[in-house]
Image (cartoon, rainbow, N blue to C red):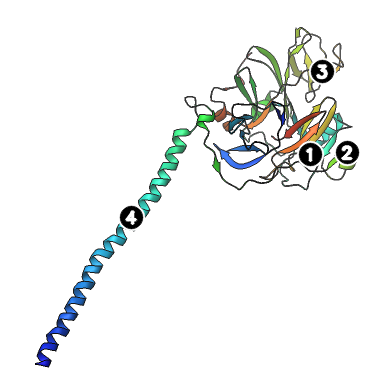
Amino acid sequence: MVETTSKPSVVKRMVRLVVLAVLSAAVAVPAALAISKWQDWQFRASESALSLAMTEHAISLENPPSPESFFPMQVVSRPPSVSDFPILSAEEAKGKIEDNELVLGVTINGESRAYPLNVLTGPDREVFNDQLGGRRIAATW
Amino acid sequence: MYATEVEGKNLTLGVSGMLWEGSLVMVDQETGSLWSHLLGACMKGPLVGKELEVIPSLITDWKSWKARNAKGSLAWLPRSAIRYRSGSSRLDAGLGLGLVEEGESRIWDFGFLAAHPVINDKLAGRPLVVFFDLSAEAASIFSRLVDDQVLSFTFSENQCLDNETESSWDLQTGAALSGPMQGRQLTRLPGIISDGAAWETFHPKTTVWLPDEKP
């Protein structure tokens, strides 16, 4: 009796386990697929929203540059601003800068200063804050 | 080149790390406002709507600059680039010299300027002349008004002369070198060197100078 009652119960348990496993798989696999699809969709949606936003806000004759059409994108972290750099006299400049190097030159109230483009280049170098001929300026081009 | 005094405030400008339509966005340290580098206009923040004054400047090579500004000084830091040199042919790089005058804008392409070093033109009714010194790839815009007279210029045999007095003029400084006008100085206008495509993006109504124009 013991044997006949215990045997079917082992089989039943095994059947129950198999059924449970199949049921779990039946729920889990589509769920996992759905989640991954949803994530994929979400990623694509955000991508297309970005490109849509860029297209929508692209400046044009109908949508000229203005605070309303201003949609900048952060591409590098903000570097510190530049206001401290050596100022050389023409004599001191000899041997530093070469004749064919391009410079951004400015004259204000009789005072002249040149900013070499080869110095004024790069995210942390695009704008030099300075004072010349009694005015405060930002050398940039 | 911008003046950084805005409504009595001295601003310290820098790079924001942002781009707008591929063009640099500046930020001021004092208010955190964001400024379009090409337009010199505040686009966001407490100073929105304000504009920076463009200080007229000239890009030329060091040889030309020091010959004309013997007492001038040089801002210096170790180089962060080496490519900006005269003779390195920026002529087909799509660069141009642009000007905004009373809401109208126009750009003169370096490629065209190389073939037309002196262009008498007008923008928003203002008579102006564009000079291009090919040896230094130096482009300038000057007013053609001297006293109450509007001059017109021609370029021949490597010399720039005005038709009215036949004085000769320096293509880089706009100073009269000889003739009745010797010692006079044309007023430099705030031209901006820009990538032509970027200029057209930021000035959607701009006109582009073309060689067949006869102003």
Disc 1 and disc 3: Cα gap in Å? 26 Å
Q: Is residue A101 rendered to the left or right of residue A18?
A: right
Which-is-in-front pick, marks 4 and 3?
4
Q: Which residue is mark 4?
A: A37
For mark 1, does the 10 Å Cα neighbourhood hold few (<14), some (14 to 19), or many (20 or more) residues?
Answer: some
Give the mark nearer the N terminus: 1 vs 2: 2
Q: Which residue is mark 3?
A: B185
> Regarding mark 3 in the picture, which secondary structure is present there?
loop
For mark 4, name the chain.
Answer: A
The part of the image, by quadrant, that contains residue B36 is top right
Please name whichever residue, B56 or B161, is drawn nearer the observer in this view of the structure.
B56
Disc 2 and disc 4: Cα gap in Å? 66 Å
> Regarding mark 2 in the picture, which secondary structure is present there?
strand
Disc 1 and disc 4: Cα gap in Å? 59 Å
Whether residue B51 is visible = yes
* Quadrant housing the N terminus of chain A: bottom left
Please name whichever residue, A16 or B134, is drawn nearer the observer in this view of the structure.
A16
> Regarding mark 1 in the picture, which secondary structure is present there?
loop
